[in-house]
Image (cartoon, rainbow, N blue to C red):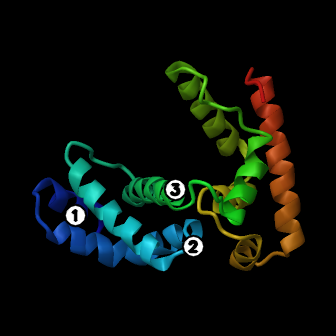
Amino acid sequence: MEDQAIIALFWERDQEAIRQTEARYGKRLLRLSCSILDSREDAEESVNDTYWKAWDTIPPQRPKYFFAYLAKICRYLSFGRVDYNRAKKRSACLMELTAELELCIPDRREEGREQEHCLKESLNRFLEGLPKEKRCIFLRRYWFGDSIQEIAQRYGIGESKVKTTLFRVREKLRQHLQKEGFSI
């Protein structure tokens, strides 16, 4: 079933929408959640909560890109579960990803909504300006949480190329944000 048909089922409040969403995107959402969480059971719970949240927010939302909408919800819920599970102990993989990005993305906690919007727009402009391969590698690592090895296998390139690409893109991102007036 196509995305727009599934969204129409959500709007009609037909429970078949959940079954169709699970059939179409369940495995991808579970993989995404598993890349964030240590426990498959927690990942499955996050995916189920994703379906519930989609049910709760459609309507009034009518997502243009359905999987992106679901993935955003799933990531948010999965990271919330990580925070809950490891309030004092942080996951090494998650901390590695955070440490890599914190050198080039400013801390938004002290910024207002307007600055947050400006940062979002700046990040989008930066990503749109990257060549497709570099953008995909960057997003696979920092949005989907894929390992260096998984990215290398996915794109048929060496792990050293993935590491070098990520290093260079992070440096370009840092320079881009500084040029746009964000302090790092």
Q: Are marks 2 and 1 in contact (CB under 8 Å)?
A: no
Q: State the mark number for residue 65.
A: none
The secondary element bearing badge 1 is classed as helix
- Give the numbered dot on residue 5: 1
Snapshot quadrant of residue 145: bottom right
Say what amino acid the circle numbered 1 marks: Ala
Task: Pick whichever of labels 1 and 3 is earlier in the sequence.
Answer: 1
Residue type at tag 2: Asp
Task: Name the disc covering residue 38, or none.
Answer: 2
In the drawing, does residue 52 fall left or right of residue 166? left
In the image, residue 153 lies at what x, y percent?
73, 80
Q: Residue at x 65, y 59 (%)?
A: 90
Q: CA distance from mark 1 to mark 3?
A: 29 Å
Report the residue marked by disc 3. Answer: 79
- Circle 3 Cα neighbour tier, 10 Å, few/some/many (<14 / 14–19 / ≥20): some
Q: Earlier in the sequence, mark 2 or mark 3?
A: 2
Residue 32: image location, x then y, percent: 52, 68
Picture quarter with the C terminus = top right
What residue appears at the point 64 percent right and 59 percent down from the top-left corner? Answer: 89
* Mark nearer the viewer, 1 or 3: 3
Instruction: Please tell me how crowded label 1 is: few (under 14), some (14-19), or many (20+) other residues with Cα within 10 Å.
Output: few
x then y, percent, for residue 174: 80, 37
Cα distance in 3D space between marks 2 and 3: 11 Å
